[in-house]
Amino acid sequence: MVRESPATYRITDLSADERPRERLEHNGPEALSKAELLAILLRVGVTGMNSVQLGQRILDELGGLAGIQRATFAQVCGIKGVGRAKAAQIKAAIELGIRLKKEDPDLSAAISSPEDAAELVRYEMQALDQEHLWVILLDTRNRKIEVDKVYKGSLNASMVRVGELFKKALQRSAAGIILAHNHPSGDPTPSPEDAALTRAAIQAGKLLDVEVIDHLVIGRNSYVSMKEKGLGFG
């Protein structure tokens, strides 16, 4: 753990018009860079580096905010100048952002586009380091009932029990479902296995009277709608 010495650089060492807290107070948080926002959480820098510079180091080493979200606590701690207390503050702030997104009242509205559906899951899914398959359950008005987190691990049509995709949908009397899975590589390009799984799910849905509305592949800050691409959907 890094021990902060008397030589540690503090926000107060910056001129008044450069201090992130004062700038946030007078100009609003949207006026600050990501490094400056992190600097407010960090409070202090380390020898030879102020808190804003340390914030930029964290962003550079972990690959931006999405990288911080994906990083483990130990990985954040491992950055020179961070330590356990600062890592905890950063991870707590990221988690608050996730929970705020979940509480967004707009997410209770009807899902009318792939973008609407992606907004429900992509912030969480893009940070996962393994493949996950989630099922968004929808009512007759295309409103979200629940997100069922069904599978974790390598996915293909032969490994996934298609009936499991519909188990919660039948229990909750869902009218339709949207499949969503992530590609940890960050590239959302659907694979042939993704298309095969989609076709199998659509066939099962017809038998069970539950429509498969779409299948989203979530990448890093991006997604692909397989329905829009015509992959797996006849």
Image: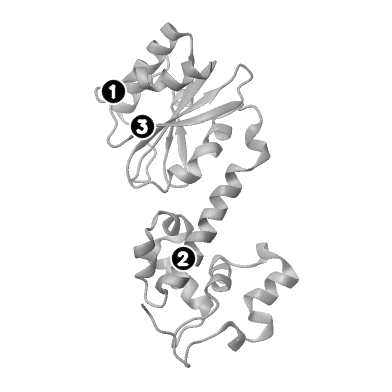
Does residue 174 show up? Answer: yes
Give the alpha-carbon distance from disc 2 to disc 3, as whole Å.
36 Å
| Residue placed under numbered mark 1 in the picture | 157
Give the alpha-carbon distance from disc 1 to disc 3, as whole Å.
13 Å
Which callout, 1 or 3, points at the residue further toward the start of the chain?
1
For the residues carrying marks 1 and 3, which lies nearer the camera in this image?
1
Q: Residue at x 41, y 42 (%)?
A: 219
Q: Amino acid at mark 2?
A: Ala
Task: Say what secondary structure mark 1 lies in.
Answer: loop
Left of 111 or right of it: where is 196? left
Front residue of this view, candidates 174 and 125: 174
Is the residue under label 2 in contact with that under label 1 (CB below 8 Å)? Answer: no
Q: Residue furthest front?
A: 171
Which callout, 2 or 3, points at the residue further toward the start of the chain?
2
Q: Which mark is residue 190?
A: 3
Q: Which mark is residue 88?
A: 2
Residue 94 appears at what percent x and percent y?
Answer: 51, 57
For the residues carrying marks 1 and 2, which lies nearer the camera in this image?
2
Q: Residue at x 44, y 67 (%)?
A: 87
Residue 195 appears at what percent x and percent y?
Answer: 34, 23
For disc 3, the neighbor class at 10 Å (few under 14, some 14 to 19, many from 20) is many
Quadrant that contains the N terminus = bottom left
Left of 180 or right of it: where is 155? left
Residue 13 appears at what percent x and percent y?
Answer: 59, 88
Q: Amino acid at mark 3?
A: Pro
Please name the colour scheme applied to the rendered image.
one colour
Give the alpha-carbon distance from disc 1 to disc 2, as whole Å.
39 Å
Q: Residue furthest bottom?
A: 6
Left of 194 or right of it: where is 117? right
